[in-house]
Amino acid sequence: MLKQTEGSHAIAEAVALCRPEVICAYPITPQTHIVEGLGEMVKSGELWNCEFINVESEFAALSVAIGASATGARSYTATASQGILFMAEAVYNAAGLGLPIVMTIGNRAIGAPINIWNDHSDSMALRDAGWIQLYAETNQEAADLHIQAFRLAEELSCPVMVCVDGFILTHAYDRIDIPSQDQVDRYLPPFEPVQVLDVNEPVSIGAMVGPDAFFEVRYLQHHKQSRALELIPQLAAEFKSQFGRDSGGLIRTYRCDDAETIVVALGSVVGTIKDAVDEMRERGQCIGAVSICSFRPFPLEEVRVALERAKRVVVIEKCLAVGIGGIVSDGVRKALSGIVLKGYTVIAGLGGRAITKRSLTGLFERAARDELEQLNFLDLNWDVVKRELERGKQQRRAGPSAENILRDLAAAGARVS
Amino acid sequence: MFQVRIHGRGGQGVVSAAEMLSLAAFDEGCHAQAFPSFGSERMGAPVTAYCRIDDKEIRLREPVMQPDALIIQDPTLLHQVDLFNGLSPSGYILINSTRSFDELGIGDFVRNFPPDHLCTVPASELALKHVGRPLPNAALLGGFAAISGRLRFDSVAKAIREKFPGKVGAANVAAAQAAYDSALAARKRMTADA
């Protein structure tokens, strides 16, 4: 049913339609309205045959999901920011044990300095933990990806993170089509675990293994992700035939056919990028965009095919890999191995800094003239940076940067008004 | 695309107002997107929320920087926050106040705006009367329907009831109706003067 609702609420409704049996969450910041909504549905009985467990931390949240999933229960949790870092050990365990948990990440920055706003630092920090990572471009896709995620997770026995831009999507009211229970039931069969803790047929899950077996078990995780590369497009195609819309898949291309410049990005910023692409196309510029939905597994082949005929690629990243630059860019570079074209990395939107169409258009125009550096920082206030660097030079004990910059900005604001 | 920016303070229902606007626009078959400015919301702190309305899918995910309409829930923000930044010269300005634009000290600033795009309504007083609490958000949406002509009052009323079911919703609809009538009357006076 088509409705106007908050992203978080739409996700909660989509998760509920997947008939989860255990939902566990640590219910304070960093958390979204998703588990709040699910908690209400469990309490009211709208979501039945489901246990909602309030836990004492994010570490506990995922640990409970691991235990529940190992007994054969369809398990779900959600977190973000410092929350996912706090559960990091369990994140690796869920993947190593091959438990098909689905977890929403309402993407946010990671401190210090403390910041509650959106970027991709949190999910990127755990990108190689063995989970599949899918990034939603819109709230419709965020809702739809959860339905696909349970199916994908359970077919492979591999956990899946659905990454949804915090605030920008989670807190936005949009027009969203929420499917019916019948539709979801036809798409998502009941959970049939490949391994299960059963008192009648005792097994142990999570045995210690030595050098003789660890390597093989870890390789099998990689093998699963290779299978996911085939399965993700199949599930997206099946989703389209049943629900009538494009959601998910490995990548999506936008006006790339004759594009000389192609912009690559993940998540909600792709919407703004598409508007910028349309505007520049109207001015006769050959530009297109690629949205990567599946970041793990990384679709090397599809990215290569989408980009190989372009003259240059601009990768917009909402996470700064300190000391090197881009993370998505590394994958894109690998995909383009042996192909000569210009590649630019642009770090943007950190800690909730708005990524505007105007800034993007200016950036893409400079890219088209090949005026960008290899590594760029969109709308970084260089004056503020220079003044802070200068303070550090003047004085050994210059004090904490975050506080210095806040004082600096306040003083600048006072001068203007 | 029509873009609305709402300014107020934490606790005044700024975010809910943008959400209700989007509900009303959806009800009229439009695409709408509402979202807050993502501050750490505290009672009394300046809060901004946005609503975009269009007849096609809205892909843009930046804050509203060039609004077509401003709804100012708290006039004490006038000299504290750069409320009018980016406002279209033919934009709408709706302020929650018992005072006129001149009395608020912004008469000169708004001189060149179309007079029927400017309006003050005593939304806090109307809310106090009808709801029992000085929460101006729903009332202002009634005022917005009157001056902008973008949304029907009925859609706004339906959105308010959806957000606040039961008695609270009905009381807020009454406040919105009063603000709608007051804004229409003010608009008539203003166009008669002009």
Image: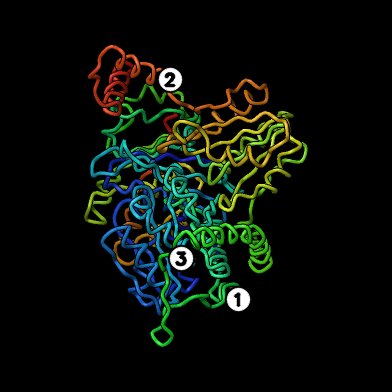
- Work out which quarter of the rendered image holds the C terminus of chain A and state it: top left
- Work out which quarter of the rendered image holds the N terminus of chain A and state it: bottom right
Instruction: Report crowding for label 2: few under 14, some 14 to 19, many 20 or more residues within 10 A (C-alpha).
Output: few
> Does dot 2 land on a helix, a strand or a loop?
helix
* Residue type, mark 1 in image: Arg
Residue B92: horizontal and vertical position, in percent?
45, 35
* Residue type, mark 2 in image: Trp
Above or below B74: residue B80: above
**In percent of the image, x 61 and y 60: which residue is there?**
A228
Q: Earlier in the sequence, mark 3 or mark 2?
A: 3
* Left or right, A148 with reference to B80: right
**In percent of the image, x 53 and y 51: which residue is there?**
A135
> Does dot 3 land on a helix, a strand or a loop?
loop
Residue A210: horizontal and vertical position, in percent?
44, 61
* Residue type, mark 3 in image: Leu
| Residue under pointer 2 | A382
Q: Nearer the viewer, mark 3 or mark 2?
A: 3
Chain containing the residue with disc 3: A
| Residue under pointer 3 | A97
Q: Looking at the rendering, which quadrant does residue A189 occupy?
A: bottom right
Chain containing the residue with disc 2: A
| Residue under pointer 1 | A186
